[in-house]
Amino acid sequence: MTITKKDNFTFNSFVKYLRDYRDSVVENPIVNEEKTRYRTRDDHTNKKHCKSAFDYYLASKNKKMLVAFKEIYGIADDEMADIVDYYERGQHQNYHSASSYRGKKNTDFSENLKSLYEDVEYDRRKSFEFIADLVSSVKQYRNTAKRFSILDEKYNEKADLTKKWARISLDVASEWWREKHQRTDIKVGVFGQDGLSKDKYGGNGREEKRVIQDEKPFIQGDGYVVQPHVKKKEYDYYKENAIEVPSLWYLNVYRHGLSTVIYKSRPCMVIKAKHKPIQRLKDKGFDVYKADIVSSKNGEISLIQDLFLISYQAKKWARHSEGKQHYDNPERTFAPHRFDTLGECHTACNESLSIAERTMSGRVVSGIANALDI
């Protein structure tokens, strides 16, 4: 049994359709067992199809209800267009909208609306608010149905891999600051991607606006920018810090467990790490990097460059066992940091390689002792 536009499904028939589909999926699994890494899960596919079928069924019935409403009340085509526009824009929720609303088609609807507001109280006018739910259902289905199709505005856009990973770098960098330095006010952006930014609370910043203010001093490194707070008086309650991380910060630093290092008893963000292999330390299991880090003290950030960073890998990064890196939502949001196994490292840094090495050795020994409960 399939749903087509010609079918006039009753509610009972639709529920039976979903039940039959669910049973057919269980009896005839669609999973290709040979492709275990990229297989499609039965449960996920079942739920996705049922949701799409329900949205279509509801939207098709609501569209018929809108047509019936138009015919029952004797509303002309242009007037119906104004009514749909009125409820689609949520104007019915604004008490004073009747006096300011102007329809698309310049019909008598706006004048009739004013008269209705004057002669009928609010509780009775609410009787027409069901139109808003009908319109919302139809519009929402149409927007969802055309996604990833030729009708989608983004269908012909070429994939921008740099921007794809830049969004992930922005998300994890914003989470890092909220977790490690809750009292530091900082705006986070991505170097070379002015449209991507987040505020202190993780909300999206101003579109097409850099978090870096050009009129204030800032430090530009290799693929990143740091702008510490500039004091206006002896003590500023609100402090304006900003940072632009490299677009591939997640790929090169975060997912390998190198994002955090303790320097001068404070957790610091490793904003850049360039591998500098030394065989003597490699034999001990240590990796050496030249790193730039960002520290925070009293709510003010600072950049410290050209440090020796030594790491000991406790867990390697690994892709999800099924290759899953997207949420099960209509947008298929890319989120590898939620599904992959992230790397874990013991780290230490200093201007002197020998001091960083001794510190790293002590931390590794301490970590082993704690793991063995010695």
Image (cartoon, rainbow, N blue to C red):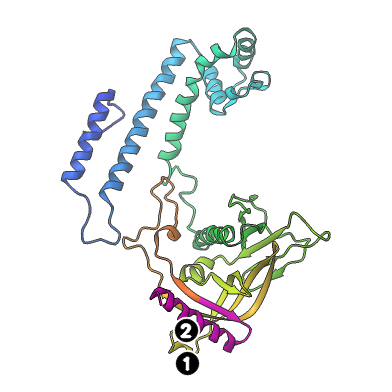
| Amino acid residing under circle 1 | Arg
* Foreground pick, 7 / 200: 200
- Chain part drawn in magenta: 347-374
Residue drawn at x 38%, y 76% is 372
Compare marks 2 and 1 and give the one earlier in the sequence. Answer: 1
Q: Is residue 46 left or right of residue 307?
A: left
Q: Which residue is mark 1?
A: 280
* Residue identified by numbered label 2: 286
Q: Residues within 10 Å of mark 2 (few under 14, many from 20)?
A: many
Q: Is residue 87 magenta?
A: no
Residue farthest right in this picture: 233
Q: Image height check: is 55 above or below 115?
A: below
Label of residue 367 in the image: none
Question: Quick one: quadrant of the N terminus?
Answer: top left
In the depicted structure, whether residue 201 falls above or below residue 257: above
In the rendering, at what x and y percent does residue 319 appear?
37, 65
User: Callout 1: few (<14), some (14-19), or many (20+) C-alpha neighbours within 10 Å?
Assistant: few
Extreme residue toward the top, this view:
119
Which amino acid type corresponds to the residue marked 2 in the rendered image? Phe
- Answer whether residue 362 is visible to the viewer in this image: yes
**Quadrant of the snapshot with the C terminus:** bottom left
Mark 1 lies on a secondary structure that is helix
Give the CA separation, mark 2 to mark 1: 9 Å
